[in-house]
Image: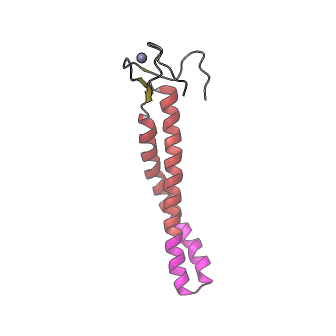
Amino acid sequence: MSTQCPICKSINIETLDYCKSAGGALGFVGGAASGAAGALSGARVGAVLGMVAGPVGVSVGSIAGAILGGLLGGTAGGVAGAKLGQSIDERYLENNHCLNCGHTFSNEVPNQPLR
Ligand SMILES: [Zn+2]
């Protein structure tokens, strides 16, 4: 971390990450919703695979497929949402808070290379 307060030059900086947390939560909900929709096709795939193992395999396969679809969708959505929120934090908001003087500032400081 090389973030430094432009006012007092303190390196005692915390990041606020408002959008990162909000984006992560929103992304997870959205991802889980689309994942649940995808879970229907996941269940179908699971059922088809399960058919090889007979009637029990069909229901086990369907459930496993549905759970997998919801989980994968939620996780992927959460990660994507957090990433999006983080870039909003870093680019558009004053995401850095100086613990020394209380000044908030964005990462768009001249001469500071973008990560
Ligand atoms: Zn400061």
- Residue at the spot x=41%, y=35% of the render? 18
Where is residue 7? Give x, y as percent: 44, 12
- Image color mode: secondary structure
Asked if residue 49 lies in the magenta stretch, the reply is yes
Q: In which quarter of the image is the C terminus?
A: top right
Q: In this view, does 53 lie to the left or right of 17?
A: right
Asked if residue 42 lies in the magenta stretch, the reply is yes
Magenta-highlighted residues: 39-64
Main SS of residues in magenta: helix
Above or below, 106 relative to 53: above
- Residue at the spot x=48%, y=55% of the render? 74
Where is residue 58? Give x, y as percent: 54, 81
- Residue at the spot x=52%, y=85% of the render? 56
Above or below, 74 relative to 100: below
Looking at the image, which is closer to me, 28 or 11?
11
Looking at the image, which is closer to me, 106 or 61?
106
Q: In which quarter of the image is the N terminus?
A: top right
Quarter of the figure with residue 19 = top left
